[in-house]
Amino acid sequence: MPVSKIIYFFYILSCILFLNCSHKEDDLGLLFGLALATNNGPCSPGSGNYNLGDDREPLSIELKYLGSYRNNHFQRSSLGSAATKTAYSPGRKRMFVADANRNRLQIISIADPKNPLDIETRGLGRYGDSPTSVDAKNGFVAVSVVQEVPQRSGRVAIFDELGVRITDFAVGSFPVDVKFSPDGCKLVIANKGEANNNYTWDPEGSITVVDLSQGFRVIESKVQTLNFRGFSKQTLIDKGVKLNGPFNPSPAQDLSPQTVAISEDSRIAWVSLQENNAIAIVDLVNGQIFDVQGLGYKSWASGEAFAGAGFDPTDRGNATDASASPRCAENEAGINCITIGNYNIKSMYQPFGLASFTREGRTFLLTANQGANRRFRTELDGFTSNRITYYDENVRIRDYCPGGELHSQFPIPASNPLCDTGAVNPLLDNQRLGRLRVVKDFAEPNPNNSSEFQNLYAFGARSISIRNPDLGLIWDSGSDIEQMLAGSKFSGDRPGVGITPFRTTSPSPFFNSGNEFMSIDSESVTSGPEPRGIAVGKIGNKVFSFTSLHTTGGVLGYDVTNVTNPIFQSYHNSRNGLIRAANGRLRDCPEIDSDGSYSFNGACYTTITTLEDTIAEVEVNRRAGDLGLDNIVFIPRNQSPINKDMILVTGQKSGSVGIYEIEVNQ
């Protein structure tokens, strides 16, 4: 027996007899952990993430919901996400959940996916204040942790799949995503570098690359944090990068890394700069940021490429405009209808999740185009009791007219057609574009036509896209997601002989709903359904993508084998009408009627007291479904506990992980 295993045996024995290791770690644990890391750690050159020897020829796939793991608490904004990210290790069939709410790493067995079992909880207080991401590779787990003052340098902690600490090291400010390369020889961390609330401390965004080719020995010497100081502001602007941070920050401060994807050959990383509508390309071989590219804008005008049927820009649509998707319901603003249509306006792509795949020797990048605006939290002024917003880049379109907050900046008179309340004006009309939020720093009147604005850009393309390695756009899902949620697309029989019907689960009650309140259309004025997490999986001779919707909820699948013509496969939403309101009230709304219709009773509240809150929260957690969806993990069948392809989907708000089987139709 190897010496490391003998040492580890005595460590486990010590845990059982003396150390109570489920609740604490000490230097002895570190010593034994290091003894286990004398090999090459997770590095296995030439290995990858995908199925091997899979000769299936799928016609289509469907998502089968098996259930959810729940840690029985909701996200509370002051404490962070109840479940931030999820990772999976096939060796012991365990998943790892970063719980920012309680500053811990949870280790759960999914050997029986329908009955997840808590195995271990690892407190993370010694590394920082709150975990933001987790990833696993070849029996090792990496967790990124921000500090109590998040502008300070964060840390990444490494564990084995049993929860034994191996090592930890410093990275850049505010690390938000951590990813092992497919061969396990690199670890890449996106460091957001977010400013503090009153913008007096704005650290630089950065990307940390860790060389794991020699394991974890002398790890500090293998950590390289890359910055953006070599990029000039004008060069980036010329490339379409959005740089509009307040108080004239440097490009290195303004650029804000968010998530990471790595090529199948482990040589290139792409890092989303979501708030900047850009992506950074990182050369992992030479350890340098090779390029930063803006992603351009998506036009919603009729006839434009990928505009489709348009989008829903308002939470106050009327029945007259709802002919294409006549779904109406009562929300807190009154009767509102889903009103998807084409408008002469553009959206920034602003992807959150990224995923890379290779097809016939060519590499492609998938993006989930969620959208994001910079808004630093409001606080109560202790003297006046007024709320202070230190910075907010978004504004409603109608705010440029008299009475709007930007009227003093652009003093457009009420007589101007732009602000004419007596005419049907899409830019002013609350039932059309008037309430849509756009980037205020970019908008300006068109000098050639005073009744129009130029550079009106909304947040997020409400879609998924496929790009080439240099970030050129190949395909975008257009209006697919909102049309599907509205019930006007992807229902009934799937085209093709012998292929099962499209599988959706009556999504309409949650059309562009928030991830806490069930209020139809409430998010239409911002970023709609917010495609956020994305994963890719090879099943037989085809490639499929899986995307989570952060606000609406649910997961949708596409066959992306043909990158110029992906095919929608399936959508499933596990949430129901019971949710926990931010003010501590429960809202228990009706289920969907058998005919697919639904209703909303604005008075369906149950008030709970502070004493009852904990008990009620557990019950709400059990019944609410998965809310505030984030990352997705694809598990190929040769690594699955049930010998079938699976996905795991993190629910940030609900503190849960949705577990799905992928049914393959051949």
Image (cartoon, rainbow, N blue to C red):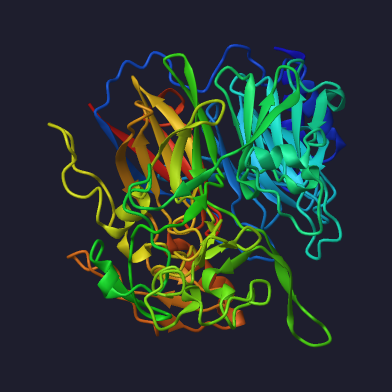
Residue 219 locus on image (x, y percent):
83, 25
Residue 43 locus on image (x, y percent):
67, 18
> In percent of the image, x 78 and y 53: which residue is there?
129
Horizontal placement of 435 versus 287: left or right? left
- In this view, which residue lies farthest toward the bottom? 384
Q: In this view of the protein, which residue sits in the foreground, 533 or 473?
A: 473
- In this view, which residue lies farthest toward the front? 448
Can I make out residue 327 in this image?
no
The image quarter in which residue 248 lies: bottom right
How many discs appear?
Answer: 0
> In percent of the image, x 81 and y 28: which residue is there?
224
Q: In this view of the protein, which residue sits in the foreground, 30 or 444?
A: 444
In the displayed structure, 653 sits above or below 231; it is: below
Can I make out residue 650 in this image?
yes
Q: In this view of the protein, which residue sits in the foreground, 636 or 241?
A: 241
Residue 275 locus on image (x, y percent):
64, 50
Quadrant of the image containing the C terminus: top left
Quadrant of the image containing the N terminus: top right
> In percent of the image, x 59 and y 68: which residue is there?
395
> In percent of the image, x 76 and y 86: which residue is there?
385
Horizontal placement of 236 versus 528: left or right? right
Horizontal placement of 643 versus 88: left or right? left
In the displayed structure, 329 sits above or below 338; it is: below
Q: In this view of the protein, which residue sits in the foreground, 372 or 644?
A: 372
Residue 398 locus on image (x, y percent):
52, 74
The image quarter in which residue 543 lies: top left
